[in-house]
Image (cartoon, helix red, strand yellow):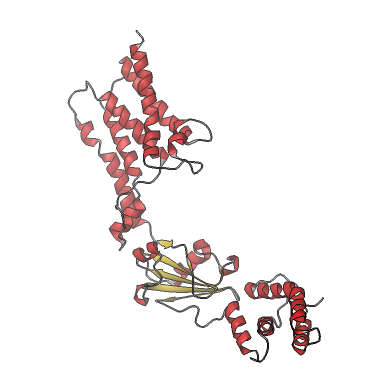
């Protein structure tokens, strides 16, 4: 008497746990957090991924109840469910990876076809394919509905592939890399466009790359636009030749100047950042001076004329360098006095420079 009800409950449980088993088996991560998807998808709680499973699960249960009672058994239902399920599977395809392989020089190391971790698509696909499997039995031979089943997944695939080509200008940025000298930073950006100054600079200004005055690690920024998706994906700066470059944009913190040019341009060659200026100033000090005195005098010499008591709009790195020297000056001068003597000429020289720069208060 209770056997049909027990079977129905068992089927409901099986339908519910299927996505959790799949997600866990593939090593997917939870929706909110960094745990395995199995437990996250298993419970329909507000703070778990299982809550996203409820809509499709309840809809499928309702359809199965109507089907079981014989009140509603449309011949198109299994095929529509199959189409929606396959469309759900298709929407999990990593189309960014696939399109890059189809339309650029990108050659992935692993399989071209990979799935995104999209729990909603997985829930819909799993539930709908279960609905198909449980309602196909006893139907007459497939008619036009069966032939129409592939249309939904094909529509998803076609829309994503054609949409990639029709989406207009593409700019995809690599994470970036420090150049040879501290303070110089560079980015690789893949683009499908030919160089147009306004288009490229507008993309940069509107958030494409963080301006150097907002980046603690950058004083000068070089943005290399390339038509090689492969190089951008691999962050391959070392072997990037000038022939690969569509355009170069240079952004400087000291005057907030942004310039761009077609092809390759060496942004760092005609500008000295604070580190370079400080090193050059240290080298210019008399070789007869002790090393610590040379370093301090050289580093301080580039602070001449820098107002350290106002909030700067330009030369942020230089102001920060000079403020650091001023903050450390009391400890530095004490160390110099202990090392060279309180009345040593080199110590007085440092004190005189500090007075000129208003380091002594």
Q: Quadrant of the C terminus?
A: bottom right
Q: Nearer the viewer, residue 107 or 159?
A: 107
Q: Is residue 147 above or below residue 154?
A: above
Residue drawn 37% across the image and 15% down it:
6
Residue 150 lies, in percent from the top left, at 25, 39
Q: 323 and 105: which one is in front?
A: 323
Q: How many marks?
A: 0
Q: Quadrant of residue 29?
A: top left
Answer whether residue 52 is visible to the viewer in this image. Answer: no
Q: Residue furthest left?
A: 141
Q: Residue at x 63, y 73 (%)?
A: 317
Q: Quadrant of residue 224?
A: bottom left
**Residue name at image x 31 percent, y 57 percent:** 109
- In x, y percent, where is residue 72? 31, 19
Q: On the picture, is 272 further left or further right than 359?
A: left
Percent of width and height locating residue 153: 29, 41
Q: Residue at x 70, y 75 (%)?
A: 325
């Amino acid at each position: 008497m209770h056997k049909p009800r027990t079977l129905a409950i068992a089927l409901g449980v099986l339908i519910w746990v299927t996505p959790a088993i799949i997600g866990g088996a593939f090593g997917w991560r939870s929706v909110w957090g960094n745990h395995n998807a199995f437990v996250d998808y298993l419970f329909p709680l507000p703070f778990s991924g299982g809550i996203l499973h409820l809509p499709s699960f309840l809809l499928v249960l309702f359809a199965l109840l109507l089907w079981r009672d014989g009140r509603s058994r449309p011949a198109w239902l299994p095929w529509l469910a199959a189409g929606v399920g396959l469309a759900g599977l298709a929407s999990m395809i990593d189309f960014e990876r696939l399109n890059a392989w189809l339309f650029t020089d990108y050659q992935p190391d692993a399989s071209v076809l990979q799935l995104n971790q999209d729990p909603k698509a997985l829930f819909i696909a799993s539930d709908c394919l279960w609905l198909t499997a449980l309602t196909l039995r006893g139907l007459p031979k497939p008619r036009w509905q069966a032939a129409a089943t592939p249309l939904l997944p094909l529509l998803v695939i076609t829309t994503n592939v054609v949409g990639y080509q029709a989406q207009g200008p593409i700019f995809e940025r690599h994470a970036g890399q420090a150049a040879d000298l501290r303070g110089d930073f560079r980015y690789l950006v893949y683009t499908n466009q030919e160089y147009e100054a306004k288009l490229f600079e507008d993309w940069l200004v509107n958030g494409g790359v963080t301006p150097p005055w907002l980046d603690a690690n950058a004083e000068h920024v070089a943005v290399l636009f390339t038509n090689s998706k492969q190089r951008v994906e691999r962050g391959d700066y070392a072997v990037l030749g000038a022939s690969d470059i569509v355009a170069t944009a240079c952004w400087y913190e000291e005057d907030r100047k942004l310039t761009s040019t077609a092809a390759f341009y060496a942004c760092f060659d005609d500008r000295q950042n604070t580190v370079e200026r400080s090193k050059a100033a240290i080298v210019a000090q008399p070789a007869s001076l002790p090393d610590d005195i040379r370093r301090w005098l050289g580093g301080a010499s580039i602070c001449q004329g820098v107002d350290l008591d106002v909030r700067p709009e330009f030369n942020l790195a230089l102001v920060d360098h000079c403020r650091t020297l001023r903050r450390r000056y009391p400890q530095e001068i004490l160390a110099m006095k202990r090392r060279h003597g309180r009345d040593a000429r080199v110590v007085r020289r440092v004190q005189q420079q500090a007075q000129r720069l208003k380091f002594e208060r």
